[in-house]
Amino acid sequence: MSDSAPTAKRDGFTSSFGVLAATLGSAVGLGNIWKVPYMTGANGGAGFLLVYLLATLLIALPVMMAEIAMGREAKANPITALQRLAPRGLPWWLIGAFGMLAAFLIMSFYSEVVAWVFAYIVKAIDGSILSSDPAVTGAAFGQLISDPLQSLLWQWFVLVFIGGILLLGVAKGIEAVTKKLMPLLFVLLLVLCAVSLSLDKAAEGLRFLFQPDFSKLSASVVLMAMGLAFFKLSIGMGTMMTYGSYFRDEQNIPATTVRVMTADLFISMLAGIAIFPAVFTFGFEPAAGPSLVFITIPAVFAQIPMGHLLMVLFFVLTAVAATGAMLSLLEVPVAIIHERFGLTRRKATLISLLILALAGSTCALTNSTLAEFKLFGMTMFDLFDFLSSNLLLPLGGILICLFAGWVWGEERLLQALSNRGTLANQRLVGILFLLLRFVTPALILVVMLKGLALF
Ligand code: PHE
């Protein structure tokens, strides 16, 4: 147990594969399983994918590289990191403080969706959601989310589970767990893809997912794709800075981020291939978000040979994906409280969990006790989602770009990303620097303003 004082040797990732698994574990999450496949299908298939890819390359990747580089240079949590890297004067450390706030807000609602996933593993095993009638599976979902006790208990279970892994430390907790979970995720996805592709209407599902339809592209779809790229790679809130601080000195940051981005995209595509052929074969609508995963999917599995087992696998897979993302979210406040306030890692974890249990309960009870409790016309679940995605993440992203591009500067960025000149990637870093200075912050600003205008 690493209950070490902050002054002891700092915990960190110990192997190249460990770095990759943990970072990929953060990027891969609930987003891949329902958000990307659905958005791709609903917004013109391959056309949307192309825009999403561009947004990932122009927005997400530069910010991700900068965040990780800054974290590794400072070898500290996001608040301390910015205090160390920034010249005295301007409060750049606020990026870290906003990041911690964003982490709590995201975790508050994210943990509730993960709670439903864990509850569904049990429901899948006992067969209570095994019905080919969406009215039955829909009623089961409604019953779960409108039961305050079940909602809270499952959320606390998730929090204790994630907190328990974090208590083991960075290397023995995050790294060890994600190293096992990421390969498992791939295997489970491949099994589900194979089954889905063997179904009658597989081609129709694939067409829905991959046939380019540029007529559906509009300004708002382009902006949606950019926002998705942003959220998908866990950037703009210090998650990647925190993980960067655990990166090994010899790790090739640009290569690692490109690998993570590629693998994350690949997992999203596999999820789409696993989901849509099956959905089409049984004549369901490719509906959005929660209803696709929690209502349609069970009804689909009920009609597939070995569907009972495969449904259990599907929800285990989703839980696996969400676990890596939750670990990285919770690690942000844990690292900050542990290092900044000199508390042990155990105390920092407990304090973070307590704050979360309180803040998260407002989201857990959104469909029951607190259904009528609204601020700015939104339930806490929607408000936290809105505040983090549309305000804090983009703001953090812009500030990280501005800091890296205008304050930290090209020479230090180059030193950090070329591992002190031992990697031959000078030209690449030069391009990255220009993106960070001008292109990326301007693009993010557009996304943010549009997000606020939509409100
Ligand atoms: N990238 C994660 C997903 O797709 C979500 C996440 C956002 C994780 C921000 C950490 C930080 O589900």
Image (cartoon, rainbow, N blue to C red):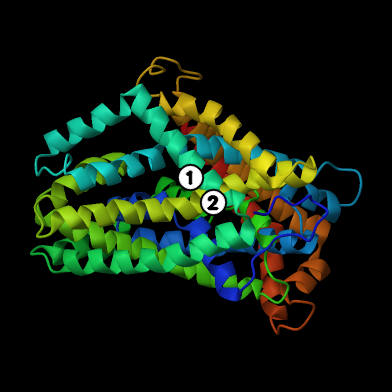
Q: Looking at the image, which is closer to me, 111 or 429?
A: 111
Which amino acid type is marked by label 2? Answer: Ile
Q: Are marks 2 and 1 in contact (CB under 8 Å)?
A: yes
Circle 1 crowding by C-alpha within 10 Å: few under 14, some 14–19, many from 20: few
Any mark on residue 165, and which?
2
x then y, percent, for residue 140: 20, 33
Up-down: is 156 above or below 233?
above
Circle 2 crowding by C-alpha within 10 Å: few under 14, some 14–19, many from 20: some
Q: Is 125 displayed left or right of 73 in the figure? A: left
Any mark on residue 76, and which?
none
Q: Looking at the image, which is closer to me, 9 or 435?
A: 9
Separation of marks 2 and 1 at Cα, in angstroms: 7 Å
Disc 1 on helix, strand or loop?
A: helix
Q: Which residue, given by chain and number where applicable, does mark 1 sit on?
A: 161
Which amino acid type is marked by label 1? Answer: Phe
Label total for image: 2
Quadrant location of the N terminus? bottom right
Q: Looking at the image, which is closer to me, 79 or 312?
A: 312
x then y, percent, for residue 429: 70, 73
Q: Is residue 8 visible?
A: yes
Q: Residue at x 40, y 31 (%)?
A: 153
Q: Residue at x 70, y 52 (%)?
A: 400
